[in-house]
Amino acid sequence: ANTFISFMNGAIKDFTGNSIYNVATRFQAASVITDTSKVSLAAFTLDMNSNTLALNFSNVVRAATFLATAVTLQGSSSGGTSYTLTGGITSSSDGYSIVLPLLPQDADQLRILGLATSLANTFLSMTINVVQDYNGFGIVSIATTNALQVTTYIADTTPPILLNFTLNIDQARVVFQFSKIMNPSSYNPSGFTFQTVSNISGVAFSSYTLTAGTAYLGTSYRLVNLSLTTVDLNALKMEQLTANDTYLSVAYGAILDTANNSVVPISPSRALLALTFAPDIIPPSIVGATLDLNTGALLITFTEAVIAPGFNQRTTIQTTAGLNMFAISRTSTQVFVAPHSSVIQLLLSDASLDTLKLNPGGPILINGTYVTINTSSIVDYSGLGLTNNLTTTLLAQVVLDTIGPIPVNASLDLTLGLLSITYNEAINAILNVSTVSILHPVTGNLIIQLDSSTVPSFSGRIATLSISSSSVNTISSSVIGLQNVTLSIASGLLTDILGQLSPANAVPYASLSLDNTPPVLQQYTIDMNTGLIQLTFSKSISANNLSLNQITLQNLAQNPTASIQLTSGNLSV
């Protein structure tokens, strides 16, 4: 009914040259055999630079019927990682080819999945209704188990551009917006520098290059969130940045896209101004406090890193709220604040620590001890101080003293005959000096074990043991050329103020001062009947170091008229 044929004059002639009759007449076909062969996809091209997909078919197709959601890209011919397009409209005309611009979200998803990055992992499958031929029929489908490999693959070589960024100090976060999806694991902190002016050429400026941080994709795949470290955050706080002077320069290789293209550098002479800047408006506050009676430290923890220039240690400890107030000595308390730390450590004096241990109000317990802290000079790295200058907080933890004194260091002075041992807490009594043995530092052999001839004393944390002269002589003969000795201390040498015995310990390297005092001749006697001369010295001597030929007897103390120099004899010491 819809198939006719007509001829132009002279289109057909017989053998004698006569033209076909009734040229103007259209003749209806006696019968029509329609085209029942299926159209198939012959080849396809994927251009990740322009984000376009070009499909080439074996016959003409109707472009208006093309359905992008019927197309699936996958990592291998038999399956693997796959992604089905969510949409897209072609502007192609009817014909053998359809060119489809990929939707941005589809292009981003392919990059996120690591799919279609080369010829090796770019395959296509599609359903029968992807497009219609001119007869209105669907084309040959391509199963996911036998996908068609890409014919031409054009890799992504377009570098990403940093479009804008925001900085929120209180959230410790930077948000970057790029022109394409990025690979957050490629983040290189040294490539990002914050500066207070847009052009640093020839002007005084302040800048800070990041040192670390954790980068991850945002809710939009073209956003990269950066969680700042405490160190970097505090450094930026100290820059005193504002919305009008927060600029960023970016180095080549600072971050890469999923195709390993570097972000386009932003020169320090044309730095990018922050889209938005949220300053630090939250002051620090106290989280809690811990009192460690073993180490003598009061640890005060804040919500953020703080500094304490000129900290006035007007700090009190109360065993019950408002009662038994104990003021920590300002002059004898040491204050430690590590850089970028949220903890202030007050190292209590020996006297303060002893007072707390012997607290007349009873033991210091976690549920009944409060700390009041003068916080007037405590600020965060933005210069914000605590809202309350005198803050009272319940102790979060109390570490009670349950361990006897531990030696910290020791020294042995053989000239004075004194062994001094410094402990980590105040000493209450010395009980048994025989627990102390002095060992050779190399061989570990016993040199001497102290005995009752040793006289003990103590002051604060220092125990002093006065060693007898005979013990000093024994030690001196065994430590020639050494700079230290080893102390082995059995349990029970002394007690702390709570009466706890010192545990067994060793001091591997007790410093040694050798005896440098020469012996002094105190008296001598001569027995002419026996031919014996007896010399008495102020300290023990070695017979090996006594030379007879250096001893002279004379008849007068000064200007003698007769003398004799000894030459030989038998020595005994």
Image (cartoon, rainbow, N blue to C red):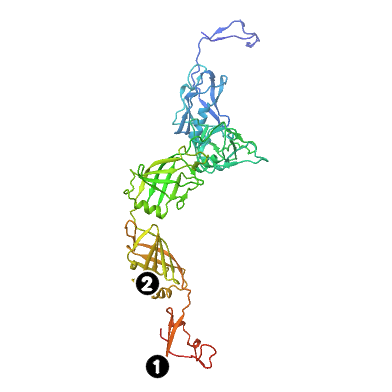
C-alpha distance separating marks 2 and 1: 37 Å
Three-letter code for the amino acid on which mark 1 is drawn:
Thr
Q: Nearer the viewer, mark 2 or mark 1?
A: 1
Q: Which callout, 2 or 1, points at the residue further toward the start of the chain? A: 2
Q: Which quarter of the picture shows residue 157?
A: top right
User: Under tag 2, what secondary structure?
Assistant: strand
Residue 207 visible somewhere in the drawing: yes
Circle 2 packing at 10 Å, graded few (<14), some (14-19), many (20+), is: some
Q: Which mark is residue 448?
A: 2
Q: Which mark is residue 6?
A: none
Three-letter code for the amino acid on which mark 2 is drawn:
Ile
**Which residue is nearer to you in this view: 468 or 85?**
468
**Which residue is nearer to you in this view: 153 or 208?**
208
Q: Which quarter of the picture shows residue 396?
A: top left
Residue shown at the point (53%, 93%) measured from the top left: 561
Residue 535 x, y percent position in the rendering: 43, 85
Residue 6 x, y percent position in the rendering: 59, 9
* Identity of the residue furthest to the right in this view: 202
Residue 140 visible somewhere in the drawing: no
State left or right for residue 88 relative to residue 401: right
**Which residue is nearer to you in this view: 283 or 247?**
283
Residue 306 x, y percent position in the rendering: 48, 43
Position above or below: 522 against 236: below
Circle 1 packing at 10 Å, graded few (<14), some (14-19), many (20+), is: few
User: Under tag 1, what secondary structure?
Assistant: loop
Q: Are marks 2 and 1 in contact (CB under 8 Å)?
A: no
Q: Quadrant of the C terminus?
A: bottom left
State left or right for residue 449 relative to residue 74: left
State left or right for residue 373 relative to residue 431: right
Position above or below: 252 against 500: above
Residue 177 x, y percent position in the rendering: 54, 32
Residue that badge 1 annotates:
530
